[in-house]
Image (cartoon, rainbow, N blue to C red):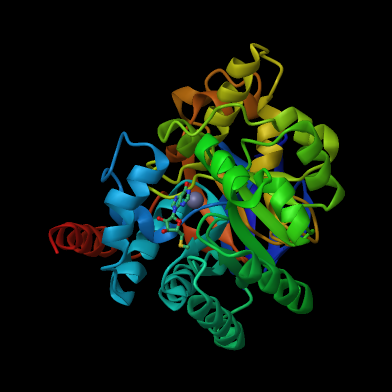
Amino acid sequence: MSILIKEVELNGVATDIYIENKYIKQIGANLPVTADTVIDGRRKAVVPGFVNTHGHAAMTLFRGFGDDMPLMPWLEEKIWPNEAKLTKEDVYWGAKLACLEMIKSGTTTFFDMYHKFHATAEAVEEMGIRANISSACFDQFKPELTEKSKQTIQKLYNEMDRYSKRIHFSIGPHAIYTVSGELLQWADAFAREHNVLIQLHLAETEGEVENSVKNFGLTPVRYLYKLGVLSPRLLISHGIYVDDDEIRMLADHEVKVAHNPASNMKLASGMHFKFQEMREAGILVGLGTDGCSSSNNLDMIEAMKLASLLGKVWRKDPEAVTADEIFQSATVNGAAIANLKAGKIAEGYLADLSLIDLNMPAFTPNFNFISNLVYAANGNCIDTVICDGKVLMQNRKVPGEDEIMERAAQIAYNLIKR
Ligand SMILES: CSC[C@H]1O[C@@H](n2cnc3c(O)ncnc32)[C@H](O)[C@@H]1O
Ligand SMILES: [Zn+2]
């Protein structure tokens, strides 16, 4: 299977891109090659597929449900009682809707932490994108649930051979207020032994920090340090409430961070995400949307704008988070966190990319393409998406999209009534 994209704009220059066997094989002007599929790239620009480093895919079912609340009442009163009713079928259609939405806005890889692992994995497999899906766990500090969680993680890990290489396994302990230190330490040892990542919500709210100090005598990052679970395999989401010493601890242990500006603002968790300090300390910061009840979409272009504007305003410094820096977070940093040779349009890299329609007001005039992408556009500018060397969307059409939206909406209405 080969694809030739003709005369697409790459860094402002009309270029051909030849894709073969999942990889970008050749880039150059007027390439003398033929291909199974030829795509006209004129008036389009090529960008790497975005990597959404934090989310809960099937929470698309809760879009517009439980708005305008702070984190803990939102989780305890609205989300958790309804998540307890979810069936595998519900999660499958919710995750299909998430994949559809991500493809339509140019995301080719996402990280997921949710219930019913196989339902999400099957949806990802069918939709053709990539995902790092975690075996989610909450033991609520109960030893019998700690043991059960360990068995589930081991079992799911053993079942991974049924999936393609587009799906990676990770462990998803929910947070330090729902998961015991013992399970976190076990997960760390498992992750080291099997070279997989751990996804964990951390330092998201002031309340979390207060409870951490009350219950463990330490702030969240220091608590993880004491447990010995800070490592290059740990990806923390949010990481808003961290001081300078904690940033140093995260950097020293090569911990990765997913920044989620929409959910941090909507749940009013906090705005002082220390993007500059983390970057200067050498921490890999990726960008995420979080789930659709707190974000309320999965549009990484919108997330880039929010991250940049939020980063500028709280510092009162317009240079604080530039369009170029946040674009790097959403692409090459995300790919590095996902351990993928992706996130760049370069020979030898995975063919995970999008074509952007330049015939739009947002790209007119086009003095600076990245500026227009981050500050003027949104996900609707994505025309074509290729992942793993396969075309997933062309002319903004994804096969099966009407059925996915109908089925997911019906499930969501029935769920909230149930
Ligand atoms: C273990 S399954 C994932 C779990 O996380 C919940 N969740 C969604 N968004 C957040 C957030 O911002 N902080 C903490 N927990 C969150 C989700 O509803 C699932 O229960
Ligand atoms: Zn989350």
Which residue: 58% across, 55% down?
Answer: 176
Which residue: 38% across, 60% down?
Answer: 58
Decide if residue 193 is in sight here: yes
Q: Please tell me whether residue 254 is drawn above or below residue 158 in the rendered image.
A: above
Farthest top residue in view: 316
Where is residue 374 shown, x and y percent of the image? 57, 29
Where is residue 228 shown, x and y percent of the image? 78, 61
Determine the image quadrant of residue 190.
Answer: bottom right
User: Could you tell whether 70 is left or right of 52 in the image?
Assistant: left
Front position in the image: 233 or 223: 223
Q: Please tell me whether residue 166 is drawn above or below residue 24 in the rendered image.
A: below
Front position in the image: 216 or 357: 216
Tell me the quarter of the image containing the N terminus.
bottom right
Where is residue 177 shown, x and y percent of the image? 52, 54
Which residue: 14% across, 64% down?
Answer: 418
Front position in the image: 143 or 279: 143
Decide if residue 131 is in sight here: no
Which residue: 41% across, 42% down?
Answer: 71
Front position in the image: 129 or 338: 338
Where is residue 34 shown, x and y percent of the image? 68, 65
Determine the image quadrant of residue 161.
Answer: bottom right
